Image (tube, grey):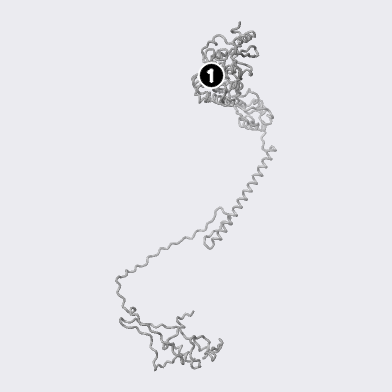
Amino acid sequence: MSDQPNRHRRRAPGEDQTPEEADRLRRLLENGGGAPQRHRRAGRGRPDDSGVLPRIPRDAPRPGGDSAWQEPDRRARPRVIPPAAPGQVPPGPPAPPSAGDTRRDPYPGENPPPAPRRLPPDPRRYETPPAPSYVDPPLSPPAEEQTTFIARPEPTTDPDAGPDERRTRRTAPGRARGSRSSAHMTRRKRRRRITLAFVLVFMVAVVGALGYTGLRMTGYFVNDDNYSNASGTGDVLVQIPQDSSLTQFGQILQEKGVVASVRAFTDAAGNAPISAGFYKLRTGIPASTAVSMLGGDSNRVGRLVIPPGRQLDTKQTADGSPSIGIFEMLAQATTVTINGQRDGVTAEELAQAAATASPADLGVPSWATDAVSALDGDHRRIEGLIAPVAWEAIDPSLTPVQMLRYLISGSADMFSQWGLTEPNQTGLTPYQTLVSASVVEKEVADPGDYGKVARVIVNRLGKNQRLEMDSTANYTAAVVNIDVSGDAYTAPTKWNTYQVRGLPVTPIGSVGKEPLIATEAPPEGNWIYFVAVDSQGTTLFTDNYEEHLRNRQKACDNKVLAVGCR
């Protein structure tokens, strides 16, 4: 597009021409070019008779020579119309040339173009605008515009990254995709390094474990030192937990300073049986000496074996030998002297704890709490609550109350396992069943007769008949004798069934498993009386009193009984 506006606009006739245009028209007319075409094109001639314009080559010589030719300036030059005065009609277009006009017609031989239609002037255009009814306020200088600058983010680097990852990550939009791809590759490399590190560590650990195991199996790390002084250097109390292995035995002994190494102890022990529990040993002794001291019961501490039917108090038998009670047995089992210092409890301390401690502190089960509370202040209230079993590991450092709690709570668990807390066909409560079983335990020596004696007790209780059991009279007697006589019959105690009806107030001794089970389910029978007739413990049962007297005479004849014999 030409930079000269209105270059191709056709001028009206009589419009001023530039000198260049006038000169060009003159030359065209002199050369016979005729009137110019309405749509002039450079390099075109006038049409021939056929109406076709001849084509002029580009390299054809121009009139006057190439050097004299100049492109006329055809830009339209707008006329400057001064504003008309108020009431004055604005000037119109220039008038057509008159007859005396010496200027030549640019289109000879052709009809001049029609004059443009003149529109009437718009009177509003030339009216004086009314004065404004307001005055624009003075323009204030533009306020300084606040410009906000966005700081370019600093390049970020990862201090833990490798050399390839410490390159600056640009945040320009054009490189966002490239940055994400680079970060993804960096994370992949990091994961590969971490995975490789874990694999290497795992392989090193496996190789190390295998090597250590192999060296240990060959005895490289095994300490087989051993002491040589058989007398040792001092006393020490050692506890071996239940179900410990022989190696664990050796580790405990080595920690206590008894043996020099576990290997020496295990080699010396071989297959010798060793029980768990507390032992009084010597420190710094050979492994073989330690094994010999662990064997047997001479060095055991806290091991208590209670026979069935044993009472809490120590009693004297008919032959003059003492029947050591549970309190005395417990005191002897838990008292130990370590390096000249005696430590343990006494029978009196145990009796005091049994009489004064609360049933809860003593570990009394719920089914015996009422009966125990009724005899507050009497140590015999816990009679029968300690089961006659082997107690292997009673801690000698416990107080009297703690020792009794350990025994009573453990016995309660045993009684439950033996079915004491389950309902039975006798109609007795668990505590009454335990009392009845303690009498059964004392009355006969043959376990096969336990059930019959239990049935006799149930039958007499059903008839509201006194039990009249010699064992109940012997419980409070100073001398225990199978042939009860004298004050034992007439002693007004709560245990003497010759004087009171029903069961004794407490059990009369420790109750074993067999009499307890027999009492829970006694056989059917109508037996009311029984008596042992010989030294082997043969017992005869009957429901007839006359027959019972005859059976009793047999016992007198066999020197089993002396009281009441003819």
Q: In which quarter of the image is residue 90?
A: bottom left
Answer whether residue 153 is visible to the viewer in this image: yes
Q: In the displayed structure, would residue 318 be above or below residue 47?
A: above
- Tell how many labels: 1
Q: Could you say which quadrant of the image residue 157 lies in?
A: bottom right
- Residue 306 in sight from this viewpoint: no
Task: Find residue 268 and report its horizontal and vertical position in percent.
Answer: 68, 29
Quadrant of the image containing the C terminus? top right
Q: Furthest residue to the top? A: 566
Residue 510's spot in the image, x, y percent? 58, 20
Give the residue type at disc 1: Thr
Provide residue 277's location: percent of width, then percent of height: 61, 27
Q: Is mark 1 on a helix, strand or loop?
A: loop
Asked whether, in this view, residue 282 is left or right of residue 496, the answer is right
Closer to the camera in the image, 344 or 57: 57
Say which residue appears at 32% left-offset and 70% top-offset: 136
6 vs 463, nearest the viewer:
463
Residue at the extreme right of the image, as rendered = 218
Describe residue 140's horizontal placement relative to residue 449 as left or right.
left
Crowding near the residue tagged with mark 1, few <14, some 14–19, many ≥20 C-alpha atoms within 10 Å: many
State the residue position of label 1: 506
Residue 74 coordinates in the image, percent (x, y): 46, 84
Report whether 215 appears left or right of 490: right
- Residues 397 and 38: in front is 38
Position of 374 relative to 47 (above/below): above
Is the residue 166 above or below the residue 366 in the image?
Answer: below
